[in-house]
Structures are given as C-alpha cells and as structure tokens.
C-alpha cells in the first residue's frame, strides 16, 4: 500500500482533475474556422457541468504557427488569431468565478525564429548574441555534431546572417535558447511573472527535458535497434542532447518564481522512462509538482502489464511526490483510436480512479477515435516532414463536436481540421441526452471522484486478479472503494480477496448497474469496469 500520510490534502491539484484544451480546436467565436480564447470562455459552463477542476490551455502566444503556437514570437502576448490580452483576462476572470483554475503552456526550450531575441542574436551583436546555441561548422564542414531534430533531419541549421549554425531540438523555425545564460533565465522568469500577475494558477512546461544539453555537445551514440519504420529522431540515443542534470536546476528556478505568487502548480512535460521521470520532482521536491507520467499512453493494453506498471510507478515515487496520470494529449493518438471505443470507457474509469492527478484530453469524453485526415488536409509539420510513418498529430487535434448544427457548433466556417464522420451523433448535445453515453459516463466518474476522498487522496493497493481483470482498492479512513476492470472482450468473474468488506456495485462503464451487492463473485461483462463501494467491518 502506498501513499499513506505523504500528502498535504489541502492542495487543490491533488484532488483536482486537469482538462487539456487545444485552443485551435475547442470553440471558434469569430467564424474563421479556428478556435480562440473567447470560444474557450463561452464553453466554461460546460466544463463546470462536466466536473473538472482546472484547464490547461495549449499555447496562444503570438506565433508564426510553424508548430501551431509552440513557436513563440512573444512570451507576453496573445496571437490575434486567438484574441487579445483582454480576452485572456476575461477567460481567467470567468473561470475563477466558476471555481476553475487556469494553467498555461509555457515553452522554455525554444522560441520562434521570429522572436526579437533571435532576430537580435543572429546579428552576432548586442546583449542577446549568446541567448541561443550558436556554433561554427564542424572542421570538416556541416553541423557541429550529429544530433537529430525531434521532427526529423539535423538539429542544426546554418544561419547566413550570423555565419554559424544554431541548435533546434524541434523545427528549424524553433531555435533552442541557452539556459546557461543568466540573462536569458531572467528574461524567461519575467515572462512567467507577467502571467502569474494576471492570475494564472500554474504552468505546464513544454519539452522541458530538452532545456539543458551537454556542454561539450558530444555526439549521441547510435540506436542499434532502429529501423526505417521509426522516426528519424530514434536513430540515435538522446543521451547528450536531453535529460541533463542542469534541467533540474532550471525547473527549480521557475518553480521558485511561481512561489513568489503563493501556491501555483508546475507541471513538466517529459517523455522519459519512469526512473528518469521521478527525478523531476527535484531535490527536496523543489522541482515540478507533477512530472507528467505518460506511461498509459505507451503501455500495451492488458491487465497484468498495466497492474505491474502502476505498482512500479507507485514504488518509484520519491517520498511526498504526488503521482499523476495522462491518457492522451495533442501529440499522441487518442485513447479510443488506440484501444477501441469499448476499452476507452474502461480507460476513462482507470484514469479517474487511480491515485494521482488525472489529466483528461478534450474530446476524449466523446470517445473520439481514429479520424482520417485526407492528404490535402494534413497540417502537422512533423507529418509533412516525415510522411508515411504515422507520426502525424492532426488526428488527435480535430475540432470539438458540440451539436448537430453545421460544423458541429464548433464554427460557422469549415474548420481547420475535419470533424469525425459521425460528428452529428458524436457530439456533446447528443451524448448529454443519452445516460449511457461516453460523455455521461465521464461526467459520472468525475463527479463520483470529486465526492469520494478515497478516490482522490486515498491510498492505492492492487488486489489479486486473474486473466484480463485488473483490480485495486482505494481507501481513505473508513471509505473503501474498489475498482475492477475487465481489459478483455469476454465475460469473466472476479473473486474479492478473503477479508474484504461487504461491497456494492455503484457504477459500471456500461452505465446500467448500481445498488447491487457482491455475493462471493463479481460477474463482469466483456469490456466492463465497475466501481464498488465497501464498508469496513
Ligand atoms: C511539446 C509539445 C509539442 C510540440 C513540441 C515542441 O512536445 O507538446 O506539441 O511540438 O513540444 O514545442
Ligand atoms: Ca476563431
């Protein structure tokens, strides 16, 4: 059993659920086919109704949009496509009035090539000449080392203005800044303060495992298992270009800035193995409050594997480190596309009953699955740079589907990405009216979690199970909650462990069971998960 006594239960984000909004795709308010901040504001009541506690909004800063806003040209503004600072302030005010928190996406690793800092730096003159990672060509000509961009091709581009190469972990239009430079650090900290003073409740730090690179820029070693079916970035092992010890200090520095404003949440985006993720809680837990745990995104979907992974993660957490779980985001295939619509319901129950803060991705509450993107509508720069590998991120970025009006109530104009073929029925309006829909299930889970401290703050213990069944218990004081998930498509039985409390089924992923006492064995249908309430006896 893990978790007992290690938490300060007053912190909202331990109990709360975070909902990620990709603002291009949530709600368009001005008929250009692209979502915006005023659109987010108009939909806040929906989020309150759904039962989430905080929204994380992907970037809306001024940007040439080579990577849809993850290429920031001004850290302290709003792109006109998304609105104005006033529209942002209105989102914060209206969200706070409804008890919702706002988390911004901060992009510390790189700016846009159009950022004035880069424009100055490339001249090789002035106080910002060393704010980026500039190097001469290798003695033999070509890039200074063998590093590869996450989107394929060399991680170095030659700048004719300066006559040197600059480093970019992502697109050539996203030059990496140099966090070893104290002036750059100060400028980034000032940008954080700009938003903290406007009332934001926290930050998700983008690509933060990249912020510090090996000082000597040593070559990365080859990955001997790489095949041409994998993206270019996987050709090398990223041991010198990312996840360097200095990253922890950078995060601790940003966390400290947030603390000038009281308790604010710091989340770190990290694609790393578990033992590396947990290091990002930092020394004495001065790093990220929540180093994103993406294991459910990559895990093979079977009961034994998931059970082992959950226990291993719980065991790896540092003392006092609060866990978190993520099922999907704007960079990875949607959960319903990965495991199918039936298991997506089981996955929602898993996410919302595990110990740790869940991050829920917009549209997953409708069970949006695979969306086919016709070749002429592909927008993701990674898909365009490395076609045919299935790395495209457009399928998980399609517009939210609100109702059966034209363009699903998302816009009055053709949206920037297509809707699902079944959008008219796979919408908030349609699913709200159906008590067994994915939306109704998600809402019921969110509200049940909120009402039961065993599920938010309680301890976690895996229970014995066989075959396709994953079972665990959450407990807080006298409140026991047991979760039993059938990860397979065939009916099965689960036997509660000897000495279990009396248990009653309170919810099923099929939305048709409640008030049913468990007598010896619990029958489960294929693809069914249930929540059981137990009384200590
Ligand atoms: C993060 C973002 C991703 C973006 C990349 C570069 O991984 O989630 O969407 O492309 O950083 O900023
Ligand atoms: Ca718009």
Image (tube, rainbow, N blue to C red):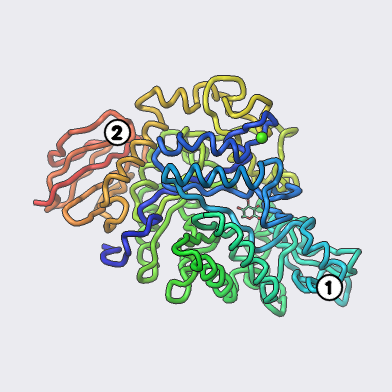
Confirm if mark 2 falls within 8 A of ligand 1.
no
Give SS at disc 1.
loop
Give residue 165's position: percent from left, percent from top: 83, 68
The quadrant in which residue 242 appears is: bottom right
Is 511 positioned to the left or the right of 37 in the image? left
Identified at 23% across, 37% down, the residue is 506
Mark 2 — residue? 525
Q: Give the numbered dot on residue 355.
A: none
Give residue 381's position: percent from left, percent from top: 72, 47
Give residue 28's position: percent from left, percent from top: 62, 33
Q: Is residue 413 above or below residue 265?
A: above
Mark 1 is surrounded, within 10 Å at the Cα level, by few (under 14), some (14 to 19) or many (20 or more) other residues, namely: few
Mark 2 / mark 1, whichever is N-terminal: 1
Mark 1 — residue? 126
Marks 2, 1: nearer the viewer? 1
Is 225 positioned to the left or the right of 202 in the image? right
Give SS at disc 2.
loop
Identified at 46% across, 45% down, the residue is 360
Confirm if mark 1 falls within 8 A of ligand 1.
no
Using the numbered discs, state the Cα–Cα distance from disc 2 to disc 1 in whole angstroms.
Answer: 68 Å
Can see residue 300? no
Front-lying residue, 194 or 45: 194
Can see residue 250? yes
Front-lying residue, 224 or 114: 114
């Amino acid at each position: 059993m893990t978790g007992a006594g290690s938490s300060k239960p007053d912190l909202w984000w331990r109990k709360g659920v975070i909902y990620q909004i990709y603002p291009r795709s949530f709600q368009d308010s001005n008929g250009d086919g692209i979502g915006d901040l005023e659109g987010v504001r108009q939909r806040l009541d929906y989020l309150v109704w759904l039962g989430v506690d905080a929204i994380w909004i992907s970037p809306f800063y001024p940007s040439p949009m080579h990577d849809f806003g993850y290429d920031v040209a001004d850290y302290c503004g709003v792109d006109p496509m998304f609105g104005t600072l006033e529209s942002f302030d209105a989102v914060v005010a209206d969200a706070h009035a409804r008890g919702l928190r706002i988390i911004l996406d901060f992009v510390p690793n790189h700016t846009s090539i159009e950022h004035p800092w880069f424009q100055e730096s490339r001249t090789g003159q002035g106080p910002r000449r060393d704010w980026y990672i500039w190097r001469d060509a290798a003695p033999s000509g070509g890039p200074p080392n063998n590093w590869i961009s996450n989107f394929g091709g060399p991680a170095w581009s030659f700048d004719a203005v300066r006559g040197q190469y600059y480093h970019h972990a992502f697109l050539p239009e996203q030059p990496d800044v140099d966090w070893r430079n104290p002036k750059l650090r100060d400028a980034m900290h000032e940008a954080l303060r700009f938003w903290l003073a406007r009332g934001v409740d926290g930050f998700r730090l983008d690509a933060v495992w990249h912020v510090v690179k090996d000082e000597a820029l040593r070559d990365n070693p080859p990955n001997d298992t790489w095949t041409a079916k994998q993206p270019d970035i996987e050709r090398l092992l990223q041991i010198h270009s990312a996840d360097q010890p200095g990253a922890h200090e950078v995060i601790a520095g940003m966390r400290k800035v947030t603390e000038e404003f009281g308790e604010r949440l710091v989340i770190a985006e990290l694609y790393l193995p578990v033992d590396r993720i947990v290091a990002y809680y930092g020394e004495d837990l001065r790093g990220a409050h929540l180093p994103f745990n993406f294991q459910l995104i990559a895990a093979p979907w079977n009961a034994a594997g998931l059970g082992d992974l959950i226990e291993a993660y719980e065991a790896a957490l540092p003392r006092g480190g609060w866990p978190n779980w993520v099922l999907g985001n704007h960079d990875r295939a949607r959960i319903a596309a990965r495991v199918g619509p039936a298991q997506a319901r089981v996955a929602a129950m898993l996410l919302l009953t595990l110990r740790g803060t869940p991050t829920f991705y917009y549209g997953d509450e409708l069970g949006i699955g695979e969306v086919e993107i016709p070749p002429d509508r592909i927008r993701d720069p990674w898909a365009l740079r490395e076609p045919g590998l299935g790395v495209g991120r457009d399928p998980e970025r399609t517009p939210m589907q609100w109702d059966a009006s034209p363009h699903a109530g998302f816009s009055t104009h053709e949206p920037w990405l297509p809707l699902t073929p079944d959008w008219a029925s796979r919408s908030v309006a349609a699913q709200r009216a159906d008590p067994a829909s994915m939306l109704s299930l998600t809402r019921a889970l969110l509200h049940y979690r909120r009402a039961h401290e065993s599920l938010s703050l309680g301890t976690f213990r895996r229970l014995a199970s066989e075959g396709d069944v994953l079972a665990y218990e959450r407990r807080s004081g006298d409140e026991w909650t047991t979760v039993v998930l059938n990860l397979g498509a065939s009916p099965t039985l689960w036997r509660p462990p000897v000495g279990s409390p009396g248990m009653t089924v309170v919810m099923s992923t099929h939305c048709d069971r409640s008030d049913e006492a468990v007598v010896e064995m619990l029958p489960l249908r294929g693809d069914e998960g249930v929540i059981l309430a137990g009384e200590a006896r």
